[in-house]
């Protein structure tokens, strides 16, 4: 996003969802994962989404980020409605403006840490030389300069999650979507990962939406949304 875009949109929510419903229909069974959800997230917020398993947390993240289509309602990112984008445009938009951190890491085992981090840039059309430089800078930011040519199998769980964070940040995203980012980490590594995300949120004004089961993680954010049965039960700052 250029400076003019930011100036035009700075007073508007970076994420705006209105009456969002998501229904999975197998033909014989219909399951409503999200039921008429309305939600705004301001630029620079760090939001935790909590609730019991199966309540719709990950579905909400996927629908807000455009990874999954909604059944009804609207989702806008910077005043642009996702449903108006073609799949190709939406994929490029996500690669350029969003970052994703998943519990399962989702790194390609045949690529080095650096090569994994380069992927979003290469997908969005960045020149290989520039992608390499940006990946190296992102890995330096998360403290993995000495490990960038190592493969995932050669890294610890904490290091792997740092690679996924570097990958999510390499395109300097406006929004970072994190699904249980500390779920597979021990308490020490979990604290380190959260400290890093808090630092980035504070210094870069990046918006974070974090799905988590952890009260400790939620306490470090500035807003907690609690979901149950596909609806927002509470929303506290």
Image (cartoon, helix red, strand yellow):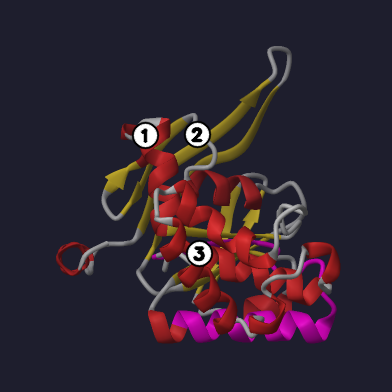
Is tag 2's residue or tag 1's residue first in the polypeptide sequence?
2
Q: Residue at x 56, y 46 (%)?
A: 62
Label 3 vs label 2, nearer the camera: 3
Distance from disc 2 to disc 1, alpha carbons, whole Å, reads: 8 Å
Q: Which residue is mark 1?
A: 83
Q: x, y (%) of residue 226?
A: 62, 62
Q: Which residue is mark 3?
A: 176
Q: Which residue sits furthest top?
A: 27
Distance from disc 3 to disc 1, alpha carbons, whole Å, reads: 20 Å
Is tag 3's residue or tag 1's residue first in the polypeptide sequence?
1
Marks 2 and 1: CB-CB under 8 Å?
A: yes
Q: x, y (%) of residue 209?
A: 53, 64
| Nearest to the observer: residue 145 or residue 41 | 145
Label 3 vs label 1, nearer the camera: 3
In the image, the segment drawn in magenta is 174-201
Q: Which residue is mark 2?
A: 69
Q: Residue at x 77, y 52 (%)?
A: 53
132 horizontally vs 12: left or right: right
């Amino acid at each position: 996003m250029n400076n003019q875009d930011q100036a035009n949109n700075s007073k508007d929510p970076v994420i705006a969802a209105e009456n969002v419903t998501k229904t999975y229909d197998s033909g014989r069974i219909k399951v409503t994962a999200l039921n008429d959800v309305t939600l705004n997230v301001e630029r620079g917020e760090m939001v935790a989404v909590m609730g019991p398993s199966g309540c719709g947390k990950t579905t909400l993240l996927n629908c807000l980020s455009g990874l999954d289509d909604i059944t009804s309602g609207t989702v806008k990112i910077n005043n642009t409605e996702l449903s108006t984008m073609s799949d190709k445009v939406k994929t490029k938009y996500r690669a350029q403006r969003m970052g994703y951190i998943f519990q399962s890491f989702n790194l390609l085992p045949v690529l080095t840490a650096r090569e994994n981090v380069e992927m979003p840039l290469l997908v969005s059309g960045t020149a290989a030389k520039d992608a390499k430089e940006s990946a190296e800078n992102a890995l330096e930011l998360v403290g993995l300069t000495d490990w960038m040519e190592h493969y995932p199998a050669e890294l610890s769980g904490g290091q792997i999650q740092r690679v996924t964070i570097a990958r999510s940040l390499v395109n300097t995203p406006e929004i970072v979507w994190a699904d249980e980012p500390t779920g597979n980490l021990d308490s020490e590594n979990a604290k380190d990962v959260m400290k890093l995300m808090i630092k980035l949120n504070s210094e870069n004004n990046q918006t974070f939406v974090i799905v988590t089961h952890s009260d400790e993680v939620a306490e470090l954010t500035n807003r907690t949304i609690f979901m149950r049965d596909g609806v927002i039960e509470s929303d506290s700052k």
